[in-house]
Amino acid sequence: MKIALINENSQAAKNAVIVNALKTVAEPLGHTVFNYGMYAAEDKAQLTYVMNGLLAAILLNSKAADFVVTGCGTGMGAMLACNAMPGVFCGLVIDPTDAFLFGQINDGNAISMPYAKGFGWAAELNLQDVYRKLFEGERGLGYPKERAAIMAKNRGILKDVKAASCKDLLTVLKTVDQDLLKAAVAGEKFQEYFFPNCQDQAIGDYIKSIL
């Protein structure tokens, strides 16, 4: 699985802590982590939590990533921004129990975490435990097990509702503020990671046209 990490500007200084925790768990399980930044508060490309949502949608809809790990100070802003986008199903995950339940019940493709609120002593251990609950084993099995079938049915219904209520991503990319879009894909390693992994030519071509 290709896992993308996206940090916004207020918590960019914690990128190294977050990506190290993510790689510690995900890479031994055979997953690949792509760190889209921000890498430091001083980065030239500054991501807001709104841009996080837009970037997450680009990566997931183009299949350049299979899962997105993002967040902000409380995790709520990035979650809202992600869920405003087509094809993104993002949960607010604070602890390993949240991660387990989100993975088994909702089986979404993104999480948003708080990197300021409650981010204290041994926070990196909580991160590792969260990622372990997300990426070890199979997701979407249901919890409790006897409700697995109805949970899977509801996930399908939610996807249908979202598809009906959202424009397709290419339309979003063409109609959203173009300066906002350019800023969202201006990261130092965006082009290095995105274009070799992008599987949607139309999305890739449009991103190339605005860069």
Image (cartoon, rainbow, N blue to C red):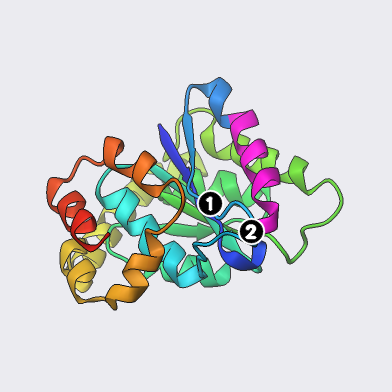
N-terminal of the pair, mark 1 or mark 2, is 2
Task: Write down the residue under mark 2.
Answer: 12
Residue 61 image offset from top left, x and y in percent:
26, 51
Against 13, is 147 above or below? above
Residue underneath mark 1: 37
Could you say where residue 111 lies in the image, as x and y percent from the top left?
51, 54
What's the residue type where badge 1 is placed?
Gly
Q: Residue at x 44, y 58 (%)?
A: 90
Q: Is residue 5 left or right of residue 15?
A: left
Q: Which residue appears at 68% of the width and 38% of the height?
A: 128
Q: Residue furthest right?
A: 121
Q: CA distance from mark 1 to mark 2?
A: 8 Å
Please say if 45 is above or below 208: below
Front residue of this view, candidates 55 and 41: 41
Left or right, 94 with reference to 173: right
Q: Is residue 128 left or right of residue 64?
A: right
Kind of residue sitting beneath label 2: Ala
| Residue 141 seen | no
Which one is in front, 61 or 129? 61
| Percent coordinates x, y for residue 118 in the rendering | 77, 62
**Residue shown at 83% from the left, 56% from the top:** 120
Q: Chief secondary structure of the magenta span?
A: helix
* Tags 1 and 2 touching, CB below 8 Å: yes
Residue 190 magenta-highlighted: no
Number of other residues with Cα within 10 Å of mark 2, as a class: few under 14, some 14 to 19, many 20 or more: many
Magenta range? 12-25
For mark 1, give the secondary structure. loop
* Identity of the residue furthest to the left in this view: 202
Q: How many marks?
A: 2
Viewer-nearest residue: 150 or 135 = 135
